[in-house]
């Protein structure tokens, strides 16, 4: 992640962050893991609903 100080629309100083290429790559990896977890949870819930 990259950051820099800028002035906002209301003339206040604030730090702005930008996602780097490495950060985008890591975010893709984490998103894939998260989607796999959501799929697994969905399967567990569907099985529980069928059994219940």
Image: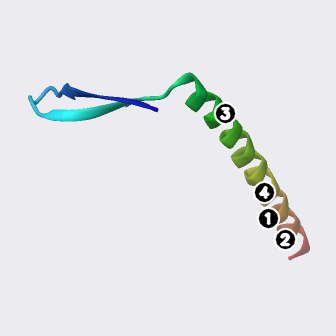
Q: How far, Cα to Cα, is label 4 from label 3?
A: 21 Å
Sequence-earlier tag: 1 or 3: 3
Is residue 27 found left or right of 20 in the rendered image?
A: right
Up-down relation of residue 1 to residue 34 (above or below): above
Say whether marks 2 and 4 touch (CB < 8 Å).
Answer: no
| Residue drawn at 82 percent across, 56 percent down | 40
Regarding mark 1 in the picture, which secondary structure is present there? helix
Pair 1/3: label in front: 3
Residue under pointer 4:
42
The picture places residue 45, in percent across and down from the top left corner, at 79, 65
Residue under pointer 1:
45
Residue 48 is tagged as 2
> Which corner quadrant holds the C terminus?
bottom right
Q: How far, Cα to Cα, is label 2 from label 4?
A: 10 Å
Say whether marks 4 and 1 touch (CB < 8 Å).
Answer: yes
Regarding mark 2 in the picture, which secondary structure is present there? helix
Say whether marks 3 and 2 touch (CB < 8 Å).
Answer: no
The picture places residue 35, in percent across and down from the top left corner, at 73, 45
Say whether marks 1 and 2 touch (CB < 8 Å).
Answer: yes
Assess disc 3: are there few (<14), some (14-19) or many (≥20) residues with their C-alpha within 10 Å of its C-alpha.
few
Up-down relation of residue 44 to residue 38 (above or below): below
Regarding mark 4 in the picture, which secondary structure is present there? helix
Colour pattern of the rendering: rainbow
In the image shown, does 21 or 52 lie closer to the viewer? 21
Residue 9 is tagged as none
Sequence-earlier tag: 4 or 3: 3
Q: How far, Cα to Cα, is label 1 from label 2?
A: 5 Å
Assess disc 1: are there few (<14), some (14-19) or many (≥20) residues with their C-alpha within 10 Å of its C-alpha.
few
Regarding mark 3 in the picture, which secondary structure is present there? helix
Sequence-earlier tag: 3 or 2: 3
Residue under pointer 3:
28
């Amino acid at each position: 992640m990259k950051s820099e100080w800028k002035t906002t629309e209301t003339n206040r100083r604030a730090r702005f962050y930008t996602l780097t290429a490495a950060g985008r790559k890591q975010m893709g990896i984490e998103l894939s893991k998260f989607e796999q977890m959501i799929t697994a949870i969905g399967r567990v819930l569907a099985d529980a609903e069928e059994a219940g």
